[in-house]
């Protein structure tokens, strides 16, 4: 599994685990705050059970929000349609977390903006 926390660090994005409160019938898994920049993972949304399941959920949340960070810094274009943005962020997170074709450090390096390499 890629080191998404290391990738967040390379982008200068702080990651926090916090209680983001109740959102009615919706579960807020994480949020991206460009004014940190900070990714906050909602402790309420984490699965119960094994530490592996919790770590996977956190990594997927971080990867999803890193997509939004990349939008915010202009590394990738921001899609106009919110639903399309969320689907694309989910796909990015899935590809980043699930990919095993290359060593983790190589994938993380490739994902960095040119100025960070």
Image (tube, rainbow, N blue to C red):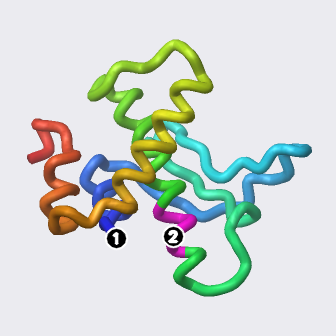
Which residue is at 20% across, 63% downward? 101
Name the secondary structure under disc 1: loop
Asked if the residue at tag 1 contacts the one at tag 2, i.e. Cβ–Cβ closer than 8 Å, the answer is yes
Q: Residue 91 location, x and y as percent?
A: 45, 43
The residues bearing labels 2 and 1 have C-alpha atoms spaced at a distance of 9 Å
Q: Residue 94 location, x and y as percent?
A: 44, 53
Q: Residue 22 location, x and y as percent?
A: 85, 51
Residue 60 falls within the magenta-colored stretch = no
On the image, which quarter does residue 82 sit in? top right
Q: What's drawn in magenta, residue-wise?
A: 55-59
Name the secondary structure under disc 2: helix
- In the image, residue 7 sits, relative to residue 50, either above or below, namely above
Instruction: Tell me, for residue 1, which label it has, or none.
Output: 1
Q: Residue 8 location, x and y as percent?
A: 35, 54
Which residue is at 74% across, 53% downward? 20
Dominant SS type (magenta): helix
Instruction: Sort mark 1 into few (<14), some (14-19) or many (20+) by Cα contacts within 10 Å.
Output: few
On the image, which quarter does residue 9 sit in? bottom left
Provide the residue designation for mark 2: 56
């Amino acid at each position: 599994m890629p080191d998404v926390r290391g990738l967040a660090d390379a982008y200068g994005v702080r990651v926090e685990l916090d209680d983001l409160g109740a959102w009615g019938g919706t579960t807020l898994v994480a949020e991206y705050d460009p004014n940190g920049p900070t990714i906050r993972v909602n402790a309420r949304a984490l699965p119960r059970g094994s530490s592996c399941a919790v770590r996977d959920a956190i990594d997927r949340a971080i990867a999803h929000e890193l997509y939004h960070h990349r939008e915010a810094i202009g590394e990738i274009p921001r899609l106009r349609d919110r639903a399309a943005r969320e689907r694309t962020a989910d796909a990015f997170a899935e590809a980043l977390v699930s990919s095993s074709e290359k060593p983790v450090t190589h994938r993380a390096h490739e994902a960095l903006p040119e100025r960070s390499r």
